[in-house]
Amino acid sequence: MRIGVLTGGGDCPGLNAVIRAVVRRAERGFGDEVVGFLDGWRGVVEDDTVSLDVDACRGLLPRGGTVLGTSRLQPFGMQDGVERARGTIERHGLDGLVVVGGEGTLSCARGLHELGFPVVGVPKTIDNDISATEMTFGFETAIEIATEAIDRLHTTAESHDRVMVVEVMGRNVGHIAAWAGMAGGATVTLVPEEPFDIAEVCAVVRRRHERGRFASVLVVAEGARPIEGTMEMPEEEVDAFGHVRLGGIAHLVSAEIEHRTGFDTRVTILGHVQRGGTPTAFDRVLASRFGVVAVDAIHEGGFGMMTSLTAGEILLVPLSEAVAEVKKLDSDLWDTAKVFFA
Ligand code: F6P
């Protein structure tokens, strides 16, 4: 067989581990040839490829980012994109295409599958917001990075008796914030799923500081928002792909806390540090398992499906289920996280 692979959307630790696993399984397991598409769907539409074999993948397992490059371009948004993509797949005689991506990339894969494209999805995102899988690779690495940062901020917060506001990624969901906040002993964590009341946040901070030199570390997901009408918010900017440009809520929260409580407050925005660098062992293993099962799925004709971590096993689930809605925070986990606030 001839198999294609692409990585789309924001980069994420573990992408190279999937590429390596796809190549290893395809070449050594089945004697297949593998074509890598550069910069996600752009490579498919513009027929920009690189041929991949086991030798070309040496040293990839621990490497962050993606050697194939990535972009947010999609055939549906490009001139004759779908027809050009179809032409590329036919020209290369591809029997299947492994699409590694988040919600945007996988939604596109689902749409193309409905038009007859032989795609199998692999979910990636540090945000962990893809439905129908318990976890995406990249998430564990991100929460390890965020937790380490929170631990470090505790010691400087305590030394100065300050309030530290740490912003983590999480566009629509608070998985990173909730996990890293809980692991790092956050005073309060703010997530997109539950709009916050800044007056309550300030009350918690005040109570904590009144008990002595108990510095606070607040963890804020970039998509967290106040309850409407409780705090002034600036107009939101939108990027070329229609995504609201996030980042900066920590500055607004910090300014309000300082203004309302008088405590010395500082902001740390972790940003893309959470997406960069080497994946954890867990993410390397999850990414490798996904890559192997994706190739097996192509050999079994499992098109329109996505690899999923379900109760410790790697299963195949319909792409339509995976992209139907974003996976929100589990309410039990969130309730437990709140036990430790203040
Ligand atoms: O989807 C992952 C994510 O990390 C989001 O949490 C974040 O909002 C977004 O990517 C930012 O991506 P970029 O800066 O690449 O547009």
Image (tube, rainbow, N blue to C red):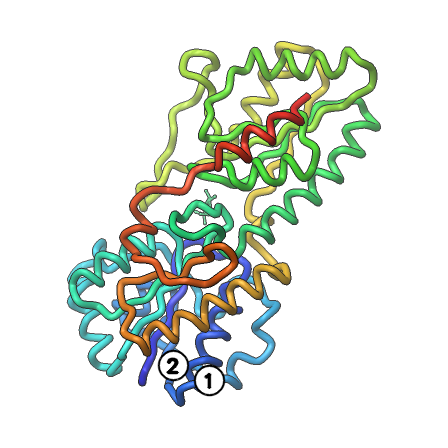
| Horizontal arrangement in the rendering, residue 82 relative to residue 208 (left or right) | left
Residue under the point 33% across and 56% down: 106
Which residue is labeled 2 in the image? 34
Q: Position of residue 10 (x, y in %)?
A: 44, 53
Mark 1 C-beta closer than 8 Å to ligand 1: no
Give the vertical position of 340 relative to 180 (above or below): above
Q: Position of residue 255 (x, y in %)?
A: 59, 19
Which quadrant holds the C terminus?
A: top right
Residue under the point 55% across and 15% down: 198
Residue under the point 18% across and 63% down: 82
Alpha-carbon distance for marks 1 and 2?
A: 7 Å
Q: Position of residue 222 (x, y in %)?
A: 50, 34
For disc 2, the neighbor class at 10 Å (few under 14, some 14 to 19, many from 20) is many
Task: Please tell me in which quadrant of the rendered image residue 171 appears.
Answer: top left
Which residue is labeled 1 in the image? 53
Residue under the point 49% across and 70% down: 67
Which quadrant holds the N terminus?
A: bottom left
Residue type, label 1: Asp
Q: Identify the element where label 1 is drawn.
A: loop
Q: Identify the element where label 2 is drawn.
A: strand
Task: Please tell me in which quadrant of the rendered image residue 161 appears.
Answer: top right
Q: Earlier in the sequence, mark 1 or mark 2?
A: 2
Q: Which mark is residue 286?
A: none
Given contact means CB atoms under 8 Å apart, are the residues at marks 1 and 2 in contact? yes
Q: Nearer the viewer, residue 321 or 94?
A: 321
Give the vertical position of 224 relative to 62 (above or below): above
| Horizontal arrangement in the rendering, residue 208 relative to residue 141 (left or right) | right
